[in-house]
């Protein structure tokens, strides 16, 4: 009697377990991630974004991961080539379509400058337009905010360069920066951390106040004869390929060669430098201010 009832009993138990786990899955809201970068239209530069994507898929297994670019110009240029990349609004809608209820938006900007401010505003405007779309929306901060961020970034860059760069050779990093000075101080913080780790590490910006001339003067006081160039940017796109390493007379590579240095370049975006994606992932996991709720009153 007991033996012939056992299979039925097992089936029932199995059904109960299945129903239980299904109910469990339904009650836990689905989480998804929106990775937001400025974007690039340089095909070779995409490897840095792909590297970040892979790290995120490892860190958040099973979670939908969607990309958005903030640059309209780049999105339009790519669209003309038949490549469609979401805007922030489109990316959020795509996550909603996949049943995501809790969104973690992660800025892949280097610092909270102009682009990050625009990203935050754009996410907030989207939430206002569709307040019922999600249960919670978190915004992960950009790469460089804390001393820890700068130390980890510095260690990652110097570790990456250590494979090629020999003793006595200088490292010159090109950051972007902004002409009105937004983010200048973050660059100064990064520069100071790098300098403390490696006296032959230098940094200047394309548009910020820390200029090439200023950097070159400091470089001139060092004993270095050979220089490694590398972008301090998420991807090695247009700035890295032209303004930094280009053949034209006004690129940093040409200007340094004209000053008598031997110049080598490492055209790797930070996204593909081991250790950098981990910092973004930490920021994604740390973000705990739900943009759908009033800030906690002090
Ligand atoms: Co630019």
Image (spheres, grey):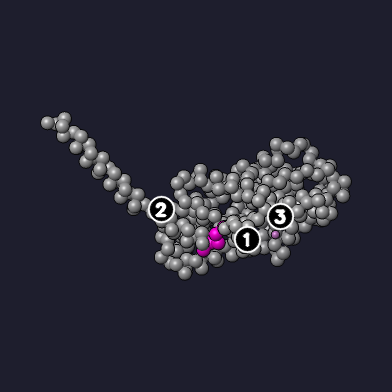
Nearest to viewer (mark 2 / mark 3):
3
Mark 2 to mark 3: distance in Å?
37 Å
Mark 1 CB in 8 Å range of ligand 1? no
From the viewer's perspective, is 49 left or right of 30? right
Q: CA distance from mark 1 to mark 2?
A: 34 Å
Return the residue nearer the eye: 222 or 171.
171
Toward the left, the furthest residue is: 1
Q: Is residue 297 above or below residue 278?
A: below
Q: Quadrant of residue 159?
A: top right
Image coordinates for residue 263, horizontal then vertical, percent = 81, 44
**SS at circle 2:** loop
Residue 285's tag is: none
**Which residue is rendered at x = 47% and y = 51% of the image?**
64
- Magenta highlight range: 85-89
> Is the CB atom of the residue marked by disc 3 within 8 angstroms of ligand 1's nearest atom?
yes
Tell me the crowding category of disc 1: few under 14, some 14 to 19, or many 20 or more residues within 10 angstroms, Cα based.
few
Total of numbered circles in the picture? 3
Residue 94 placement (x, y as % from top left): 47, 58
Quick check: 23 left or right of 203? left
Please tell me which of labels 1 and 3 falls first in the chain.
Answer: 1
The residue sitting at 62% across, 42% down in the picture is 274
Q: Which residue is mark 1?
A: 80
Q: Quadrant of residue 12?
A: top left
Ligand 1 sits in which quadrant? bottom right
Which of discs 1 and 2 lies nearer the camera? The answer is 1
| Main secondary structure type of the part rendered in magenta | loop
Q: Mark 1 touching mark 3, by CB under 8 A?
A: no
| Local secondary structure at mark 1 | helix
In-front residue for pair 80/248: 80
């Amino acid at each position: 009697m007991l033996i012939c009832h056992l299979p039925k009993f097992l089936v029932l138990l199995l059904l109960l377990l299945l129903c239980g786990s299904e109910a469990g899955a339904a009650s836990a809201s689905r989480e998804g991630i929106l990775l937001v970068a400025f974007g690039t239209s340089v095909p070779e530069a995409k490897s840095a974004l792909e590297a970040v994507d892979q790290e995120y898929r490892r860190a958040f297994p099973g979670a939908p991961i969607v990309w958005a670019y903030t640059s309209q110009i780049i999105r339009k240029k790519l669209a003309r080539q038949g490549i469609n990349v979401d805007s922030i609004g489109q990316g959020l809608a795509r996550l909603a379509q996949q049943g995501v209820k809790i969104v973690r938006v992660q800025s892949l900007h280097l610092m909270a400058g102009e682009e990050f401010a625009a990203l935050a505003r754009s996410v907030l405007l989207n939430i206002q337009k569709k307040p019922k779309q999600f249960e919670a929306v978190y915004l992960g901060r950009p790469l460089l905010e804390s001393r820890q961020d700068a130390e980890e970034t510095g260690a990652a860059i110097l570790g990456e360069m250590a494979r090629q760069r020999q003793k006595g050779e200088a490292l010159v990093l090109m950051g972007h920066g902004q002409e009105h000075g937004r983010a200048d101080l973050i660059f100064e913080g990064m520069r100071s951390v790098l300098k403390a780790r490696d006296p032959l590490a230098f940094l200047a910006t394309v548009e910020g106040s820390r200029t090439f001339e200023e950097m070159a003067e400091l470089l001139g006081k060092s004993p270095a004869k050979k220089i490694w160039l590398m972008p301090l940017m998420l991807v090695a796109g247009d700035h890295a390929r032209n303004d930094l390493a280009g053949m034209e007379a006004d690129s940093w590579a040409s200007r340094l060669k004209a000053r008598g240095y031997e110049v080598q370049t490492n055209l790797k975006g930070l996204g593909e430098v081991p250790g950098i994606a981990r910092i973004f992932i930490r920021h994604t996991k740390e973000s705990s201010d739900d943009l759908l709720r009033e800030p906690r009153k002090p």
